[in-house]
């Protein structure tokens, strides 16, 4: 009988407990707030009663209007007045994607459904995104209007005041119709903002729009964990909490390629493009069969090296051209993309005569000044002579001096005939020819006056100033002057060697006031060159022995040539180093 009473008591207690539980709602939902600013998050709590194990929640209805920043769950069990209570809380941290009223839809939890909520998202206040917060985000764009395929720099900076940041995740930067590249790895540093020291986590991107129109860069959302560094124990996790931050996106106007840009040329929008050439040897004189390597370097500020077009294999008469594989590089200099393309050609002379290396012209668009520009390597002239041969006019050089005429007249005439007989004569060559003719006529008049005066006065040998001595100081004349000096040292009289040395020195040092060998020697600051110059000067006034070269020996001539060549080689190397440094001296990205 007692056993039956016990069973009935247990059953009654179970019915009472089940009735009490039935009075509790099986599912509760609530929000921590219904009004928030853009960039903030809202927490949705779902409480399931009488549930100790996991339960499935379908989150897909949320993802169209919200980003699910994090999900957490916690189970609870307690006994109150001999009554057992149990429940599980599910916490969903949600980030609204848009402004205005947003609907948090009903969610399916197991076999039950939550209620829906309406929240209001407003524009952020000025203090909501800047100094004073533990964490805030900013996005910086280099401009709001660019040309198609022009460099667009984009920087994302996360500011935080707590000890550290863990597991940072940012919105992917992947706008439509654009190529996006990250510039190096993210880096961290510190900065004072309104008197508050912030840690900065920075990411830099370059964007190349591929179509004209509007380019939409989406809003940037950050989520991660901040720690205040309060934990000093090995087996204890630091005090961390999830955080989010927001930065508004941009709409960029992408302009079309300007109509005035040549249709046949590759579109190159940049802040600067430099083009240069170098040779591996002196090309003032080549023999058939000789080879020379030409290197052309293009450096573009604001373009990837892969965007620079090939310059094409040049078609050069009397030369075989063998191109090598181009070298394409990309660097980041002061936050800018700097692209480089290096092309090399080996040119082999096949016939004697004058060879014109054609001009290289690379059009590009100056995005700073909004105008068409061109980077140019001017055309150049190479003389190919048979082995042991001479330049045009060399054979008549001494004879021309003897009868009082300018020796350069014959050389200039030969070069002129070669130039004007080529398929196309560049304008700069025609202008140079006209200027040279005027200088020759002026030189001939001056020589005539000089000769008349010398007949009445000086008893010393007359030193004739030729057109080479009177030649204008200009780029490109130095090589010609040195080639003339080499020829004179090999076979000419001391008088003509002196003239050639002065003519070369004026071009080499760009000094129109250089009139004698003492001036030249002082410019070079070389004691051996000074001694040889004095010997040459003395030979002009030595008693005649029938041999004009006897007082300035062939050995002296050879030694002087070696010293002058060494001087030129050293100067070329230094000039190349200076030009290489200048190529990479770029302006700062942002104005101070």
Image: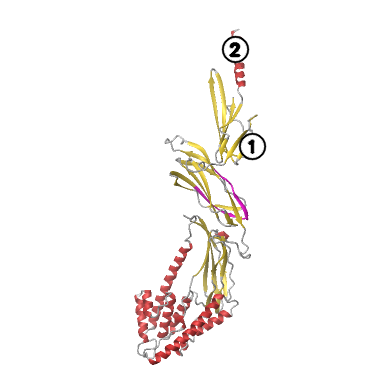
In the picture as drawn, the residue positioned furthest to the front comes out as: 126
User: What residue sits 61% from the left and 14% below the top?
Assistant: 12
Rendered location of residue 49, percent (x, y) = 59, 25
The residue beneath circle 2 is 9
Dot 2: element = helix
Image position of 48 (left or right of 472) = right
Rendered location of residue 305, percent (x, y) = 55, 60
Rendered location of residue 89, percent (x, y) = 56, 29
**What crowding class fits label 2: few (fewer than 14 Cα within 10 Å), some (14-19), or many (20 or more)?**
few
- Identify whether 24 is placed above or below 571: above
Magenta highlight on residue 5 = no
User: What residue sits 43% from the left and 44% below the top?
Assistant: 197
Front residue of this view, candidates 515 and 294:
515
- Identify whether 146 is placed above or below 548: above
- Identify whether 284 is placed above or below 267: below
- Identify whether 192 is placed above or below 314: above
Residue 61, disc: 1
Labels 1 and 2: the sequence-earlier one: 2
Cα–Cα gap, marks 1 and 2: 48 Å
- Highlighted magenta segment, given as a residue range: 202-221
Image position of 515 (left or right of 319) = left
Quadrant housing residue 375: bottom right
């Amino acid at each position: 009988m007692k056993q039956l009473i016990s069973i009935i008591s247990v059953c009654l207690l179970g019915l009472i407990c089940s009735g009490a539980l039935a009075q509790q709602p099986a599912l509760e939902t609530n929000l921590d707030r219904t009004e928030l600013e853009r960039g903030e998050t809202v927490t949705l709590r779902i409480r399931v009663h009488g549930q100790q194990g996991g339960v499935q929640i379908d989150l897909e209805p949320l993802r169209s209007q919200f980003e699910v920043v994090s999900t957490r769950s916690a189970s609870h069990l307690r006994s109150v007045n001999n009554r057992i209570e149990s429940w599980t809380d599910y916490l969903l941290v949600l980030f609204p994607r848009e402004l205005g009223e947003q609907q948090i839809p009903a969610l399916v939890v197991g076999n039950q459904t939550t209620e829906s909520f309406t929240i209001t998202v407003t524009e952020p206040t000025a203090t909501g995104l800047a100094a004073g917060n533990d964490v805030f985000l900013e996005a910086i764009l280099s401009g709001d209007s660019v040309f198609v395929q022009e460099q667009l720099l984009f920087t994302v900076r996360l500011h935080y005041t707590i000890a550290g940041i863990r597991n940072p995740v940012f919105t992917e930067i992947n706008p439509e119709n654009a190529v996006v590249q990250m510039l190096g790895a993210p880096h961290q540093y510190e900065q004072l903002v309104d008197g508050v020291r912030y840690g900065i986590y920075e990411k830099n991107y370059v964007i190349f729009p591929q179509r004209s129109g509007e380019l939409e860069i989406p809003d940037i959302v950050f989520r991660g964990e901040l720690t205040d560094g309060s934990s000093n124990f090995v087996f204890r996790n630091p005090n961390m909490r999830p955080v989010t931050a927001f930065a508004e996106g941009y709409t960029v106007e992408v302009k079309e390629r300007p109509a005035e840009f040549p249709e046949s040329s590759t579109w190159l929008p940049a802040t600067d493009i430099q083009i240069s050439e170098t040779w591996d040897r002196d090309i003032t004189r080549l023999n058939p069969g000789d080879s020379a390597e030409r290197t052309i370097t293009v450096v573009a500020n604001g373009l990837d090296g892969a965007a620079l077009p090939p310059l094409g294999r040049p078609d050069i008469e009397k030369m075989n051209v063998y191109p090598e594989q181009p070298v394409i590089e990309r660097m980041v200099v002061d936050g800018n993309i700097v692209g480089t393309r290096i092309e090399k050609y080996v040119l082999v002379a096949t016939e004697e005569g004058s060879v014109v290396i054609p001009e290289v012209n690379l059009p590009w668009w100056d995005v700073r000044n909004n105008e068409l520009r061109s980077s140019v390597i001017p055309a150049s002239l190479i003389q190919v002579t048979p082995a042991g041969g001479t330049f045009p006019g060399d054979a008549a050089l001494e004879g021309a001096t003897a009868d009082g005429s300018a020796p350069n007249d014959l050389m200039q005439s030969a070069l002129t005939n070669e130039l004007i007989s080529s398929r196309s004569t560049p304008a700069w060559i025609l202008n140079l020819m006209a200027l040279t003719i005027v200088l020759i006529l002026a030189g001939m008049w001056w020589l005539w006056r000089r000769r008349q005066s010398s007949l009445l006065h000086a008893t010393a040998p007359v030193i004739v100033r030729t057109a080479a001595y009177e030649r204008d100081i200009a780029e490109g004349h130095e090589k010609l002057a040195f080639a003339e000096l080499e020829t004179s040292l090999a076979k000419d009289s001391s008088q003509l060697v002196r003239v050639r040395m002065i003519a070369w020195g004026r071009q080499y040092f760009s000094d129109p006031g250089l009139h004698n060998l003492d001036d030249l020697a002082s410019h070079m600051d070389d004691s051996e060159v000074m001694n040889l110059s004095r010997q040459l000067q003395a030979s002009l006034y030595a008693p005649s022995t029938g041999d004009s070269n006897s007082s300035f020996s062939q050995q002296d001539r050879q030694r002087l040539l070696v010293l002058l060549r060494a001087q030129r080689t050293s100067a070329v190397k230094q000039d190349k180093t200076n030009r290489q440094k200048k190529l990479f001296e770029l302006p700062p990205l942002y104005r101070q």
